[in-house]
Amino acid sequence: MILPMNLDPTLTVLMYSSLAAMTAVIGVLPQAVRGAPSPHAIGWANALAAGLMMGVAYTLLTAGLADRLAQGGVGAVLGILFVRGTHAATGTGELDLTRLHEAGPVYGYKVLLADTLHAAHEGIAIGAAMSLSLPLGISMAVALAVHNVPEAMVLGRVLLGQGTGVGQAAGLAVATNINQVLLAVVTFAVITAAPAMLPWVIGFTVGALLYLVLVELLPEAYRQAGHTSIALVTVVAMGMVVLLSGLGL
Amino acid sequence: MSDVTLVFLFALATAVATGLGALPFLFVRSVSDRVVAYSNAVAAGLMLGASFGLVAEGTVHGRVPTVVGGLVGVLFILATQRYLDRDEEEVVFEAVRGDSGRQMLLMVIVMTVHSFSEGVAVGVSFGGGLTLATVITIAIAIHNVPEGVAISAVLRPQGVSTARCAGWSIFSSLPQPLMAVPAFLFVETFRAVLPYGLGFAAGAMVYMVLVELLPEAFHQGRRPAVATLASVAAIGMVLFQAWL
């Protein structure tokens, strides 16, 4: 079941990226029963996602570039500039995602925008990893599925706080990830058609992922749950990816 | 000259090269909170990139041992931190007291400990025959320079002189010649230990980055600048090592 060998590759990408997009529901629904999530829970979920993403970045960087280092390097710079640029253009660069109780409409709009923009390079990441190998693609999808949970926790909290219904909040949280599914499939299709693009796309993905982890996931997590526990969760998650990537590459 | 002397001298040369990493800091004069933050970000990126390289090499020799070694490396830093925190007397490193002094001392410990594994790696690779020795030596010497940059980036902004930064950088690499010789003489034994050692070094460095350097950088610096410096340094380090 984990490795559906008979499924068409494009459908496989579609399936895993859709599953990753839908985990946003897990971040929203429990809040209907249990109320606001604790900052610690969000912090640890962020750290878990950060560790998984850095683990996948490691695998992509050391296994995916072969000898085309220059393309990878230029791609990485483009990836960093892309995320930096989208943050700067939308004023979401130093968005503090811990202000769950004093959220105004502008804040809610920025969280929605930030989540939607992230989904773009996250989709590219799934597509790129899938075109290297299926297990690597699945690791990538799992990392992003985990990442989507704390993202949706914050968005869900803001929306529920403003009186949005639970169903609608969950729907919106999933909707911010739709371009993740689209770009995963498109990226996979483009690399399949033009394999020469691969080092560029891998470089872009690694740059975007590392920058995102460093600019957002880790600094937020540190504030939500303290240095030691965040560092431990992150490093253990990285170790898990290193162990698992041995199964497929 | 005997092979053993040659291995020792080659490894010593790579250790001395680490001191070159202090040179860029001749030009760092103003010592502000921002300089501390951004230097920490660069050091964090370089160490993260270096540990990617260590893990990649370790997994060639054994994936599970590398990860086990990494876990032990994390525990080692945790224990060292506890020990330094519990110490009755305040930590003083190069006349810097308190948290900064403690962090500087921890940095020198981490980088020195990680050099033991690198020394083993050098010795084992020489064990394949000395024909490639010059090439390997030059590659490792160049590879050590950014590690000197990482150490100096943490020490220099606290007011440590460039010469002393170079001194501590070289000190941190001295385990390389010391470990290279026994690893060269007993290749088979050390080859078995190598993945554990490489994993240990990577785990210790990554944990140091996550628990000390990055939080410190975020505390004083702007997030986009810290993230850009660290991610460029990390990716640059990996590509640089792959190119070597």
Image (spheres, coloured by chain):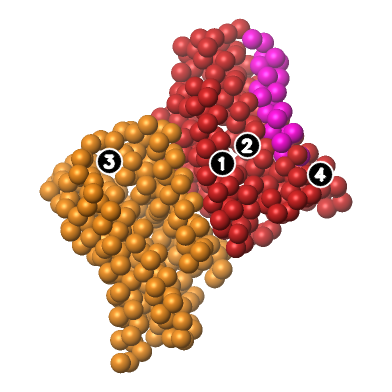
- Chain of the residue displaying label 1: A
**Residue A10 image label:** 4
Mark closer to the chain start, 4 or 2: 4
Instruction: Name the residue rendered at 51%, 64% in the picture.
Output: B243
**Residue A41 image label:** none
In the image, are marks 2 and 1 on the same chain? Answer: yes
Is there any visible trace of residue B69 in the rendered image?
no
Judged left or right of residue A4, residue A172 is: left
Identify residue for label 2.
A121
Q: Where B51 falls versus A108 (above or below)?
A: below
Mark closer to the chain start, 4 or 1: 4
Is there any visible trace of residue A49 in the rendered image?
yes
Say which element carries label 2.
helix
- Chain of the residue displaying label 3: B
Check whether the beta carbons of the residues at disc 2 and disc 1 lie within 8 A of each other.
Answer: yes
- Chain of the residue displaying label 2: A
Mark 2 or 1, closer to the camera: 1
Cα separation between marks 4 and 2? 18 Å
**Residue B36 image label:** 3
Q: Assess disc 2: are there few (<14), some (14-19) or many (≥20) residues with their C-alpha within 10 Å of its C-alpha.
A: many
In magenta, the rendered stretch is: A164-185
Among the chains pictured, the one given red colouring is A
